[in-house]
Image (cartoon, rainbow, N blue to C red):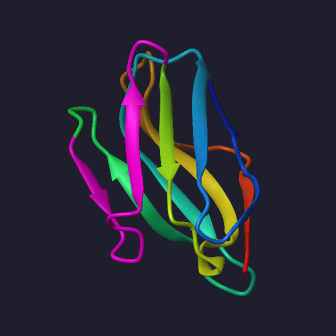
Amino acid sequence: QVQLVESGGGLVQAGGSLRLSCAASGSYLSIDDMGWYRQAPGKQRELVAAITSGGSTAYADSVKGRFTISRDYAKNTMYLQMNSLKPEDTAVYYCNAVIISSARRQYDSWGQGTQVTVSS
């Protein structure tokens, strides 16, 4: 079983920056794609950014040019650098990973979420 633990959320003024981290631990063979999702009150969860096992990245249009996703493969950790934050970025941010188990089965794993609040 894999545990994903997010950290780095908090309260920041508009225009500020935050860096989220997602650390994976537990028993697994490997981690495939990873991504950051967010869910604002009253809205559906949406994909913010994704990164493949090979390092290719993709971003939602709303965050392009402001957010950067990265991975430290040695530390089994994913990051989301968020710059020029806007009040509309306020949400709970969730880490997601596609896990390959020791039995070579693929499944999704989610973190518990971290709150990001951007004040105007």
Residue shown at the point (41%, 62%) measured from the top left = 66
Residue shown at the point (75%, 81%) measured from the top left = 41
Question: Is 16 located above or below residue 75 in the figure?
Answer: below
Q: Position of 9 compared to 86: left or right? A: right
| Image mark count | 0
Q: Quadrant of the N terminus?
A: top right
| Stretch of the chain drawn in magenta | 56-75
Question: Is 83 located above or below residue 119 in the figure?
Answer: above
Q: Position of 28 compared to 59: left or right? A: right
99 or 37: which is nearer to us?
Answer: 37
Q: Quadrant of the C terminus?
A: bottom right
Residue 14 figure quarter: bottom right
Question: Is 39 located above or below residue 23 in the figure?
Answer: below
68 or 45: which is nearer to us?
Answer: 68
Question: Is 18 located above or below residue 15 in the figure?
Answer: above
Q: Position of residue 25 (x, y in %)?
A: 61, 19
Q: Position of 41 compared to 17: left or right? A: right
Q: Is residue 69 on the magenta stretch?
A: yes
Q: Position of residue 79 (x, y in %)?
A: 49, 38
Residue shown at the point (57%, 15%) measured from the top left = 27
Q: Position of residue 33 (x, y in %)?
A: 34, 41
39 or 84: which is nearer to us?
Answer: 84
Q: Position of residue 62 (x, y in %)?
A: 41, 77
Q: Is residue 89 on the magenta stretch?
A: no
